[in-house]
Image (cartoon, rainbow, N blue to C red):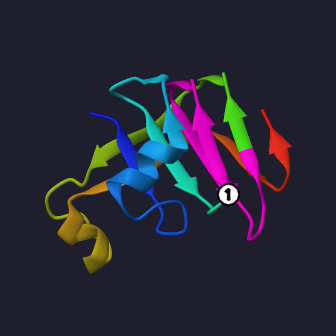
Amino acid sequence: GPRIIICPGFAITKQEILDKVEGGSITERSSLVLEGEGLKVKNLKLDGALVIRAGHDCEVKVDGLVVENKGWVLEEIPEGADVPETVSIRGYTMAKHEAMEIHDCEVKV
């Protein structure tokens, strides 16, 4: 399924997530990173990868954004591969082919 990272600065509880995210759709292959206390997302259509980072004391509202890109893909580590232990334990790496990134303050998309 989709990979969604909700940073603690965005939301900690289920209710905080429900208050900040409304409507939209995310495909099975998608990756989403949400960070920032003042971030709200409404009617997002995501097919690929999207990273939104709102700075401290910033209000970022994303409404109706459509994102289609190559996204990020999980790639299995071949048995016996020479990789750091932290990667070996996980068993995969994330190939970041393409993503839309929003790093801003006072943005309305």
Left or right of residue 75, residue 21 in this image? right
Q: Identify the image quadrant of residue 92.
A: bottom left
Span shown in magenta: 38-60
x then y, percent, for residue 85: 26, 79
Report if residue 56 lies within the magenta region.
Answer: yes
Q: Quadrant of the C terminus?
A: top right
Measured along the vertical axis of the image, is residue 48 above or below residue 14? above
**31, 53: nearer the viewer:** 53
Q: Quadrant of the N terminus?
A: top left
Residue 108: in sight, yes or no?
Answer: yes
Which residue lies under the disc numbered 1? 38
Residue lying at the far bottom of the rendered structure: 85
Left or right of residue 100, residue 97 in this image? left
Measured along the vertical axis of the image, is residue 59 above or below residue 18? below
Neighbourhood count class around disc 1 (C-alpha, 10 Å): few under 14, some 14–19, many 20 upward? many
Q: Secondary structure at mark 1?
A: loop
x then y, percent, for residue 35: 58, 59
**56, 91: nearer the viewer:** 56
**Secondary structure, magenta segment, majority class:** strand
The type of residue carrying mark 1 is Gly
x then y, percent, for residue 104: 81, 54
Q: Identify the image quadrant of residue 105.
A: bottom right
Taking the spot 44% from the left edge, 55% from the top edge, the residue there is 16
